[in-house]
Image: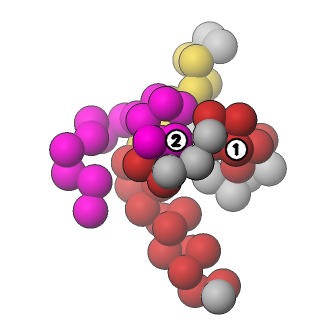
Amino acid sequence: MFDHYQDVMDVYDVAEALCIGKNRVYELLGNGSLKGFRIGRVWKIPRAAVEEYILTQSRLK
């Protein structure tokens, strides 16, 4: 689905992939809807976590 992205994405990559703003990505990370981890002040999000988020959201509708 997101093969042209790296295995570990940053907030800007996720925002681009999901067509949302970076603040919304931070919100999703903060409330646990999107799984990621921090290295210092920088969030890193596995591509698999983005795909899982999309599948989870599509099941809710």
Quick one: SS at disc 1?
A: helix
Which range is magenta?
1-16
Q: Hey, what amino acid is under mark 2?
A: Ala
Quarter of the image with the C terminus is: bottom right
Which tag, 2 or 1, sits closer to the chain's start? Answer: 2
The residue most toward the left is 4
Say which of 23 and 51 sits in front. Answer: 23
Any part of residue 19 in sight: yes
Q: Is residue 10 above or below residue 5?
A: above
The answer to whether 14 appears left or right of 42 in the picture is: left
The x, y position of residue 38, in whole percent, is 60, 25
Instruction: Using the numbered discs, state the Cα–Cα distance from disc 2 to disc 1 in whole angstroms.
Output: 8 Å
* Disc 1 residue type (three-letter): Arg
Residue corresponding to mark 2: 15
From the image, tell me which residue sits under label 1.
24
Q: Can you say whether 60 is above or below 32 in the image?
A: below
State the SS at label 2: helix
Q: Position of residue 52 (x, y in %)?
A: 48, 65
Task: Tell whether position 48 is magenta.
Answer: no
